[in-house]
Structures are given as C-alpha cells and as structure tokens.
Image: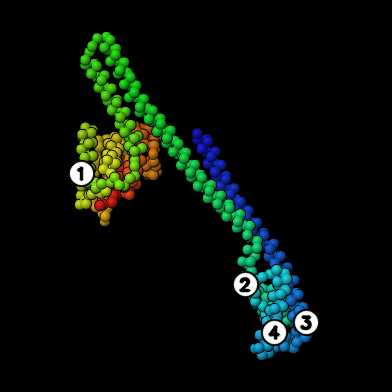
Amino acid sequence: MKNRIDKQALLATITFLLLLGLIGIQFTFLIRSAKLEQKHFNHRVVLALSESRNEIARAANACTYMHNYVCGNQCTKDMQRINSQKADSIIRSNLAIHKIDLDYTFEFVNVDKNHIERAGVACYEQSLNGLLAENGIKLLIQFPEQSQFILAQAGTLFYISLGAIIFVMMSFVFTSRLFRNQKRILTNTKDFIDNMVHEFQTPVSNIKLASNLIKKNIDAGFNSEKINNYAGLIQNENSKIEDHMGDILSVAAMVGNRSEYTEVNMHQLLNKCADTYRSSIEKAGGNLTIDLLANRFIVKGKREYLYHALCNLLDNAIKYTIAEPEIKISTYNKKNKFYVVLSDNGIGIDPKNHQNIFEKYYRVTNGNIHDFKGFGLGLDFVKSVVLQHGASIHINSQLHKGSTFTLVLNIV
C-alpha cells in the first residue's frame, strides 16, 4: 500500500510539474512570437513611412506653405494646422495600406538645429535628405499603444492556451483533493467495517458459547446457578450489541427538520447526562465537577440529539482516560451565545488529528493499532448535531495533556 501511495504521489507531482512546464513553454512561445511580430510590425512601419516621406516631399516641393511647415520655418497657425492635417492624412493612408490601425503622434524636426532625444515609447524616423532643398529634416512617428498591439497580435492563442492549462491545473488539484478525500473515506470505512465485525463477533460468539453451555447443563442435570450465570452473560452481550446498533442508527437517523425543534433547557440536559455517567466515573475512582454559570441556558433544538451529543462527549472523556478520570463541565454566556465546556485529563489528541476526528469512521490510531473500542461515529454524530443546530464545536487538546471540547450554541 505504501509503495502504491508513493507512486501516486510521484505521478501527481510529475503531472503538476509538466503542467508548469507547459506554461513555461507557452511564455517562451509568447516572447518569441512577440519578437517576430515586432519585426514584422517594424518592417511595415518602415515601408509606410518611406512612402509617406516621398509623398510629403513632393507636396512640400509643390507648395511653399507645406515646405515651411515641414522644415520648421515660420508660418501662421492656420497654415500650420492645415499642413499638419495634410501630412497626417498622407501618413494615415500609408499606414492603412500596410494594415496598421494604431493611434500615433508625428512631428518634423531639423536634426542640424535641434538635439532630439526620445525615451520610453519606440520612435520611428525617416530622413528627407535629398528630397528637399534643406537637409537635416526628419519625420518622427511614435505609437503609444504599440506594446499592447504587439501582445494582442502575438498572444491571442497564447492567452487561450494559458487559460486552458490553468483550468486543467485547477481541475487537477481539485480532482487530487477529491481523490485523497475519497481514499481517506474508503480507508476509514474499511476500518469501520473491520471494527464493526470485531465488535459484533465477540458478543455473538459469547452468546453462542453460553447457549451451548446452558444446553449441556440442562442435558447433564439442572444447575440453576450456572444457568443464571450463562443467562447473565447472554444479557450482557446482548446489551453490547444493542449499544453498538444504537451508535450506528443514531447517525443514520439524523433528520434536519427544524419544525421539530423545541426549547431545550441545557442545564437540565447537562445534569441528566451527568447523572447517567456519574456512577461510572466514581466507580473508576474519578470525579465529575459541574459548574453551571450561564444565566441564559435555553436553546432551540432537538432535545434527544443534544442529549446524545453531550453524553457522547462525556462518554469519550471517560473512555479515553487511563488514570482516574477528572472531568469538569462548565457553562457561561458570551454575547448571545451559550457555551458548554467539557474538560478531561485523558490521553489527549495530537493537534495534527484535530480536523480528522470529526470525520465519519475516523479513529486515532497508534501505528496500525486501535487502542480503544468504537466505530468512529461518535464525534461525527456530535458534529452533525452541532451543524444541524447552527452551532459550532472547538477542541483544545495535546497528547498526554487531556482534552477540552467547547460547544457554542445560539440562545433563544
């Protein structure tokens, strides 16, 4: 079993790492694709600007006002605006021919008169030397949204595949957790069946043995004392079977119909539960202390369920105490809540098992050994009752230092 678990863990780890590798490959693909798209974009921009430069030069040579605007000479604002629109129209049409539909800014500069520095956004330039009477004129153009455009062009399929991989990873993690939970439930169920068979097998065998002895005793000659002893044994074993059946059926009988809820006096319920187990505690040489300090102790719920839940906690406190049991039950109010605190000096529970002890069929083991009898249904029943009443339960326990269970219920 251990080897199989290791193989499953190894397979899960390899699968997860492969999925991460796929994401890495996708990022590498995006980077390469973006670089390729950038080169393609640059080539189209250069072609568009080259054609725009030629058209603008022809227009500048044909019109003095256009020439003054391009060369940065003095001209009126109206003429500057008109010629700027004309240059913009030429540039836009050439960009459209090369399928570049992006916002841009442009300007004409004289590099012989001005020192030009551009930082941040990539700047494309085309020299008009040899096309105008004046040299040193350059057309500069920038695309503020160029990076987004490149990623959009290169990354559409990337984002789709990345989303698919992330979805697969999430599904993988969810499925792995579900598998582990189901496997744990399967293991706990197997333990439950083994325990149930053992718990029922012993009393059934004893009953069969006692019945055979009664028959032999009757055949050999009537002995009332022996027959009474055998009959008592049968009754005791029968009681054990009834208790076991009650534990199993109590969980199966949980019904969440709030219309059946009534007002329950929790102090009265705690005293009744304490009276049920007081003799067992005293017989074991222990003490049961009750300190009911709550002023408001009426809750709405199912009396029998709450009673069995409290008795289950008290029964565990006795069962899992090796020394003379010292058990304390106390109550108090905080805000609009009713608190029940049950403490014992038992063997305690390792913090790593705190979350698991409320699972159905789960039992804390020492290696592969169950040191105490039971089906692992008790605390699951308690938790079910607590959840059904909109309440909560908390545990504070360490190995060899006892346990403290705290129930928090709503006050009527």
Amino acid at the residue labelled 4? Asn
Query: Would residue 135 be seen by someone viewing this image from the given angle?
Result: no
Q: Secondary structure at mark 1?
A: helix
Tag 4 near tag 3, CB within 8 Å: no
* Amino acid tagged 2: Pro
How many marks are shown on the rendered structure? 4
Q: Disc 2 vs disc 4: Cβ atoms closer than 8 Å? A: no
Name the residue carrying label 3.
Answer: 58
Structural crowding at the residue carrying mark 4, measured as other residues with C-alpha within 10 Å and reported as few (<14), some (14–19) or many (≥20):
many
Crowding at label 2, few (<14), some or many (≥20) Cα neighbours within 10 Å?
some
Circle 2 sits on which residue? 144
Q: Earlier in the sequence, mark 2 or mark 4?
A: 4
In three-dimensional space, the C-alpha distance between marks 2 and 4, rounded to whole angstroms, equals 23 Å
Residue receiving disc 4: 83
Residue 143 x/y as whole percent: 64, 72
Q: Which residue is mark 1?
A: 268
Secondary structure under the numbered disc 2 in the rendered image: loop
| Callouts 2 and 1 close, C-beta under 8 Å | no
168 sits left or right of 59 in the view: left
User: Which percent across, then down, holds residue 270?
Assistant: 23, 43
Label 3: how many residues lie within 10 Å, few (<14), some (14-19) or many (20+)? some
Q: Nearer the viewer, residue 323 or 206?
A: 206
Q: Is residue 79 above or below residue 91?
A: below
Gap in Å between the C-alphas at discs 4 and 1? 97 Å
Which secondary structure lies at badge 3?
helix
Could you give the CA–CA distance between mark 2 and mark 1, rounded to whole angstroms? 77 Å
Mark 3: amino acid:
Arg
Residue shown at 51% from the left, 38% from the top: 5
Q: Quadrant location of residue 141?
A: bottom right
- At horizontal 77% and vertical 82% (from top left) the residue drawn is 58
Circle 2 or circle 1, nearest the eye: 1
Distance between the Cα atoms at labels 4 and 3?
13 Å
